[in-house]
Image (spheres, rainbow, N blue to C red):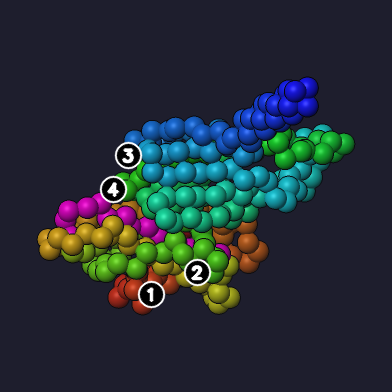
């Protein structure tokens, strides 16, 4: 009888211990409502997640390399922190990296712009930041139908973000750091997400060249109307990027491909900044 009581008590203690352990391991979710074209700020600790509009889950996995300049030191370069995020929407799941001092500092994922605004705590020369101490500030935009959009930087590993639904570019004009496109597409029943990506790096010529590509996500729109829209892309990020490169003097040739991977008929265009 005593053995049975002791055995039962042991099971109870073990179950209680496991229950407590499970509670500490449960992920923390923040439910966040993001309105169209209205920026929303989200703060996450390492391991926490934000659930945007009950459809997109952003998980802060942690910080990789952290070479930011310590606040108690003088550095030639501000350095960079590498923030790892996991994005999940339906069956689509991707792991992405954002930076504080390198590109990309922001990405777009099915209409959601996710920008890294800050990483805390600030480093000190004599202290090592532990994983659980990291906190990030993100700014979220749901910019499906915004008439003014940003240009996002990508490399070959990020080409999964490019959607290749049919898109016709009627005109392309650059004025005052804005690229204005008139585009047409079939549909009319769902939101169409159109974005512009710039590949990191430049082609050495005089003037230098950059490759850009349009992305068009029709969201499975099967309607037969033919819509025409005007979209403006802010080229300021390209200007900032080129400003940090040696030998770039204020003029760059932009080679713009459509969503089908072929050059638009107006390409290339000259951007003077």
What's the residue at 58%, 75% (across, down)? 204
Q: Residues within 10 Å of mark 1 (few under 14, many from 20)?
A: some
Give x and y (percent) for residue 184.
Answer: 21, 63
Left or right: where 183 falls relative to 9: left
Q: CA distance from mark 4 to mark 1?
A: 23 Å
Mark whose residue sits in front, 2 or 4: 4
Question: Is 44 a magenta residue?
Answer: no
Quadrant containing the N terminus is top right
The residue nearer to you, when weighing 197 against 73, is 197
What's the residue at 54%, 69% (across, down)? 156
Left or right: where 79 falls relative to 174: right
Give x and y (percent) for residue 15.
Answer: 66, 30
The residue nearer to you, when weighing 88 against 193, is 88
Q: Say the numbered circle drawn on residue 105.
A: none
Residue at image mark 2: 210
Q: What secondary structure is marked by label 3?
A: loop
First of labels 3, 1 by sequence position: 3
Give x and y (percent) for residue 233.
Answer: 37, 54
What's the residue at 44%, 32% (across, down)? 31
Residue at image mark 1: 261
Mark whose residue sits in front, 2 or 3: 3
For the residues labelled 4 and 3, say whether their Cβ atoms are less than 8 Å apart. Answer: yes
Residue at image mark 3: 36
Q: Residues within 10 Å of mark 4 (few under 14, many from 20)?
A: some
Q: What secondary structure is marked by label 4?
A: loop
Magenta part of the chain: 187-200
Mark whose residue sits in front, 1 or 2: 1
For the residues labelled 2 and 3, say whether their Cβ atoms are less than 8 Å apart. Answer: no
First of labels 4, 1 by sequence position: 4
Q: Say the numbered circle drawn on residue 145.
A: 4
The residue nearer to you, when weighing 126 against 19, is 19
For the residues labelled 4 and 1, say whether their Cβ atoms are less than 8 Å apart. Answer: no
């Amino acid at each position: 009888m005593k053995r049975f009581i002791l055995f039962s008590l042991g099971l109870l203690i073990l179950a209680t211990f496991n229950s407590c352990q499970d509670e500490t391991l449960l992920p923390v979710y923040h439910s966040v409502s993001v309105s169209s074209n209205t920026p929303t700020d989200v703060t996450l600790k390492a391991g926490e997640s934000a659930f945007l509009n009950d459809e997109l889950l952003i998980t802060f996995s942690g910080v990789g390399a952290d070479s930011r300049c310590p606040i108690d030191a003088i550095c030639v370069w501000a350095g960079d922190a590498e923030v790892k995020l996991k994005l999940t929407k339906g069956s689509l799941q991707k792991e992405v990296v954002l930076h504080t001092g390198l590109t990309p500092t922001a990405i777009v994922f099915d209409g959601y712009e996710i920008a890294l605004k800050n990483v805390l705590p600030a480093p000190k020369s004599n202290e090592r930041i532990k994983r659980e101490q990291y906190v990030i500030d993100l700014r979220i935009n749901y910019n499906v139908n915004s008439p003014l959009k940003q240009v996002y930087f990508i490399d070959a590993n990020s080409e999964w973000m490019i959607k290749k639904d049919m898109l016709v570019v009627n005109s392309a004009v650059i004025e005052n750091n804005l690229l204005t496109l008139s585009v047409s597409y079939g549909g009319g029943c769902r939101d169409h997400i159109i974005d512009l990506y710039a590949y990191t790096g430049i082609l050495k010529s005089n003037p230098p060249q950059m490759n850009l590509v349009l992305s068009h996500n029709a969201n499975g729109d099967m309607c037969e109307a033919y819509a025409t829209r005007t979209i403006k892309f802010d080229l300021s990020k390209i200007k900032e990027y080129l400003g940090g490169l040696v030998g770039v003097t204020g003029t760059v040739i932009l080679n713009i491909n459509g969503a089908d991977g072929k050059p638009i008929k107006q390409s290339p265009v000259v951007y003077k900044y």
